[in-house]
Image (cartoon, grey):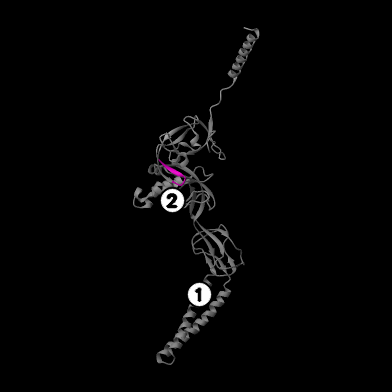
Amino acid sequence: MPWFHSRLIVACLALAWVSGCGRGEQAAPEAMTRPVKLFTVEGGSVDAVRTFPGSIDASQRAELAFRVSGQLQELLVREGDLVEEGQVLARLDPSDYALVLEDRQAVYDNSSKNFQRARELVADGNISRLDFDRMEAEFRSASAALSQAQKDLEYTVLAAPFSGRIAQRAVENFEEVVAKQTVLWLQNINQLDVVINLPESVVRSIRRSINPETVGTSTRSAESLILARAEFEGRGGQSFDLKPKEVATKADTQTQTFKATFVMDAPTDFTVLPGMTTTVQLDMRQLVNLDEVKWVPVRAVQAGSGLEPRVWVLDPETMTVSSRAVSIGRMSGNQIEIVDGLNGGEEIVAVGAPYLAEGMRVTRMELTEQAIPRAGESS
């Protein structure tokens, strides 16, 4: 063998040895992870007791206004004053209305006398029936005008329609006000409304629970299933019972939540006023027992190899996902019923499910991120 061939073989072997050593020092590629958006399934034991931010409103409130125009002569209350039912709150200058009443009283008295004389004359045939009818019409018109003048004079006094607190005052004394212009806001603070916004899943459970076929012949009998309490910041865990009042059947167009209103007796040891905030604890353990169906986003349900429905369930300790077969029911908007396969409280993949594999590691997707498809796959 020629000497240069031997040298060439030695050089190739040395190069191969060096390349092998270099590859041995390279780190093994990391396992692939995929960002996904997660959804927590409702109905688990954790979700049986929920807390919601709430706001306080007056159970009974009214915007008070005069029914006639005039100059405000007396404003007898200030903001924050407690008033009793029937208490006078403000008065208009009654001078003009008193003059009108005096004039219409005079017209009424004259027409009344003429009408009484006409009744005697028409019976004897001394006046025509046409004249009698005209005098009767004048008398009735004068009577109506007098009644209206009396009412207008009464309307110059504004009284409280119920007991409560003056929440706000819109005018000052001696101002000119027009009829039906709001002068005062009155609120009954003996009972308060507590308002919260409920997600669709919670409202669905409540609506199911108050179905007469489910719980009895009266929808009111289901109120015992809805247990709610309100807590206020700085009150050392003190809570107050709430009674269900009403639940809206139309969702808010912005938040897609339903307004729920509860009634609470006003605390006696500290002040709670409309506009304040509270935390409402809603105990739905009895509702969960009645509603075993779970609702999840439609895109969370994928088809397996045999076209059977499945979802990807997260193991929060290892941050890996596993496939779980489920049974599905009805669809409602962008959600679908899971009638079997989920217990409630699980975290399942809502966005990114088509690109997962058994045991794949995932990361929680930021709100601004989207699922990234694999190379060669359409998004």
Q: Residues within 10 Å of mark 1 (few under 14, many from 20)?
A: some
Asked whether residue 218 appears in the rendered view, the answer is yes
Residue 379 or 191: which is nearer the viewer?
A: 379
User: Magenta includes 337?
Assistant: yes
Q: Quick one: which residue is furthest to the right in this view?
A: 4
Which numbered disc flags the more N-terminal residue, 1 or 2?
A: 1
User: Magenta includes 167?
Assistant: no
Work out whether 336 lies above or below 73: above
Q: Which mark is residue 209?
A: none
Q: Amino acid at mark 2?
A: Pro
Q: CA distance from mark 1 to mark 2?
A: 44 Å
Q: In this figure, which residue is indicated by the disc labeled 1?
A: 148
Work out whether 228 lies above or below 7: below
Total numbered circles: 2
Magenta segment boundaries in residue numbering: 332-338
Q: Which mark is residue 244?
A: 2
Is residue 210 toward the left or the right of residue 281 in the image? left
**Majority secondary structure of magenta residues:** strand
Q: Position of residue 373 (x, y in %)?
A: 53, 35
Locate the N terminus and report the quarter of the image it occupies: top right
**What residue do we see at 55% from left, 75% from top?**
98
Residue 141 or 251: which is nearer the viewer?
A: 251
Is residue 49 toward the left or the right of residue 373 in the image? left
**What residue do we see at 43% from left, 50% from top?**
243
Element class at badge 1: helix
Work out whether 203 lies above or below 324: below
Element class at badge 2: strand
Q: Position of residue 361 (x, y in %)?
A: 51, 30
Q: Amino acid at mark 1?
A: Gln
Q: Position of residue 97 (x, y in %)?
A: 56, 74
